[in-house]
Amino acid sequence: MEIGLDSAMPTYSGGLGVLAGDSLRAAADLGVPMVGVTLLHRKGYFRQKLDSRGNQSESPAIWSPDDLLEPLPARVTVLVEERSIVVRAWRYMVRGITGHVVPVYFLDTAVAPNSAWDQTLTDSLYGGDAYYRLCQEVVLGMGGVAMLRALGHTDIRTFHMNEGHSALLALGLFLEQTGGPMRSLTELAHQAIRQRCVFTTHTPIPAGHDQFPLDLVRRVVGEPMTAVLQGSACCLDGTLNMTYLALYFSRYVNGVAMRHGEISRGMFPEYPVNSITNGVHAVSWTSDSFRQLYDRHLPEWRRDNLYLRYAVSIPLAEVQQTHAESKRQLLAEVERRSGARLDPAALTLGFARRATPYKRPDLLLADLARLRTVVRHAGPLQVLYAGKAHPRDEGGKALIGRVFEAAATLADKVRVVYLEEYDLALAQLLCAGVDVWLNTPQKPHEASGTSGMKAALNGVPSLSILDGWWVEGHVEGVTGWAIDENPAAPSDARREADALYAKLEYVILPLFYRRPDAFAEIMRSAIALNGSFFNAERMMEQYLQNAYSISVPFDKE
């Protein structure tokens, strides 16, 4: 449903879309014969505006596809409420380090002879009501299959559903196989489709799985297709569950971290759920200054990210100098955006996530008096926040206001700045320029998380709750620090806030100010241990071996 490829193309809302973009970049680097399919989203996700009290307002993120994409002549149609909707495609080329290209097709209904309303179907990412969303998923799933065929992709071996939004592609494959609408799915047809599909689930939160009332499904896709869905173990309690649809039609299913795989097996015990831990595209998320550092010391790192393991040989002074340049660039951008002039010598925490309650951006601010004590005893601290709340997420919006309120209260002791309009460009600066990356999700709601992986590529250690990828990436005092010590213990906000303050006061701040070389050793270890493993190259190779079951004869040279 979303793919993040360029800050000028607001066709993503957060981690799911950025991960999709990084996956395709890694595929291009590795020479994988792959294409991507998504929706055009002419109005993007949204532009965020924050007033002086942190109240968020939204406006459309209008952009021009003509400036960045190539229009293609192919047209296909999908049926919605028994009317034909014409779909066109735009192409974006992701070019890898060897020159291999992975095309990404953006589906678009803003074309004649569609009605005015139908032309808006591919406008807004995660916008509209359930009817709008289901119509979008018809375009993405069924329209995506039809468009691939129209563009000449007739030999696709595996269809990879990235979250349940695209699960209606199973109906598209069913129509191909049967030659027209039928009311029942034979076991032979099911197995034929299943052998061609794999599915990645991304959320351990039940509310994050799309569900649509069957009456709405009948209205949108018709009675024959609804009957097929009802025979597919995906309709429960009068609703179509898109995750169950994807599970039913997939030969391989995975979560996005080891812990998330465990959680998903508990949610879907009738299906074998594997784990492939997420990764980020190393070259894209490494700052210019660190790229130059790696080019000097580890010249093979762009071709083979595992060479980052040898970062242990880079002199600490060079790591410190390189980080100082990344921090300088970040603080200059902070001043340009907000007017806030921060201290380059002060320890800077970064927290940049989608603003929603389970991510708990306010955990650091739970006890402001205690936070003042931490700073008084251990040294200066400044905090950078960023992140959008979904327009309908009132809890997330309230959290932004809470950060603004705390910032005003702490102004004399701790500088807290919330940067609006979080996007790919700002994320690159934040992940590289802060000194410590903070992550405080409520367990077990963090499926994976990738922001800390991006930070690690730039020598920025994490201070995080033991959830998601951090269960695997955490080595205490080596790659960063755990806020809590037991990943199996349920979240307790008061206990975790106390642990967070203690870790800052007695471990991290003293290390940063009194033993800078020891702190730099942790920075270097974060690169060598986490940067070398939690990257999209390793992730894509695991998908090739385990999910796609193919060996690609690529030449990295």
Image (tube, rainbow, N blue to C red):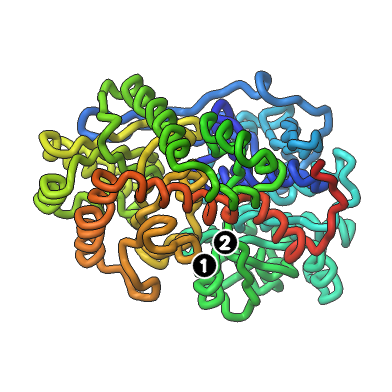
Residue 354 is situated, as x and y percent measured from the top left of the image, at: 41, 46
x 54%, y 52%: residue: 528
The residue carrying mark 2 is: 256
What amino acid does circle 2 point to?
Val
Element under disc 1: helix
Is residue 327 among what the camera can see? yes
Element under disc 2: loop
Going by the image, does 287 lie left or right of 347?
right
Separation (CA) of disc 2 from disc 1: 6 Å
x 67%, y 40%: residue: 302
x 78%, y 49%: residue: 145
Q: Residues within 10 Å of mark 2 (few under 14, many from 20)?
A: many
Residue 261 is situated, as x and y percent measured from the top left of the image, at: 56, 70
Q: In the picture, residue 228 is in which quadrant?
A: bottom right
Q: In the picture, residue 387 is in which quadrant?
A: top left
- Nearest the eye: 455 or 172: 455
Q: Residues within 10 Å of mark 1 (few under 14, many from 20)?
A: many
